[in-house]
Amino acid sequence: MGIDGLKKRQHAYRKGHRGEWLAALALTLKGYRIIARRFRTPLGEIDLIARRGNLIAIVEVKARPTLEQAMEAVGYMAQRRIDAAASLWLARQQHHARLSLRYDLVAVLPRRWPVHVENIYTAGG
């Protein structure tokens, strides 16, 4: 990889961290507790796992120019990977039967507060 490619990757990595930080802040201010960031499994990764009561929000964070582009960026294959990772995470929780799972998106848009879209898709959908 050339120096330009490395710089682009580093910029994207920093932008992703910044977006996840903003998303976590926005969710915290809405009453969620962030219980995991960048939860990685061999099957997939979850950007944020947030909890409010018995609700677990599996949150995908997308930094895009528009909300529509952020929503379109969570395609079928990404949904399957996120769902597989969420299933592994949930199976490891002691009281998993009491928890309800929801798949959300936080869109990090230019010069705007992050937009939280609840229930962007359903598992297995």
Image: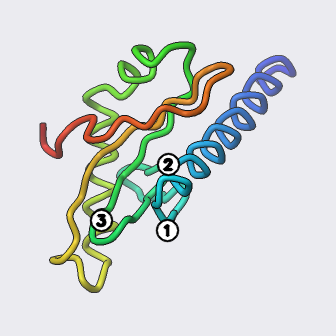
- Report how far apart the C-alphas of labels 3 and 1 lie in the structure: 15 Å
State the residue at coordinates (44%, 51%): 46
Marks 2/3: CA distance?
Answer: 14 Å
Q: Calculate the distance from the C-alpha at mark 2 to the C-alpha at mark 1.
A: 11 Å
Check disc 1 and give the amino acid type: Ile
User: What residue is shown with label 1?
Assistant: 35
The image's colouring method is rainbow
Quadrant position of residue 118 = top left
Q: Residue 60 appears at what percent x and percent y? A: 43, 41
* Vertical relation: 116 (above or below) 69: below
Position in image of residue 107 (x %, y %): 49, 30
Q: Amino acid at mark 3?
A: Leu
| Category of crowding for the residue at label 2, using alpha-carbon neighbours closer than 10 angstroms: few (below 14), some (14–19), many (at least 20) | many
Q: Residue furthest front?
A: 30
**Residue placed under numbered mark 2 in the picture:** 47
SS at mark 1?
strand
Question: Residue 73: which disc?
Answer: none
Q: Say whether disc 3 or disc 1 marks the residue closer to the N-terminus.
A: 1
Q: Nearer the viewer, mark 2 or mark 3?
A: 2
**Badge 1 density bin: few <14, some 14–19, many ≥20, Cα 10 Å:** few
- Name the residue: 20% across, 64% down: 100
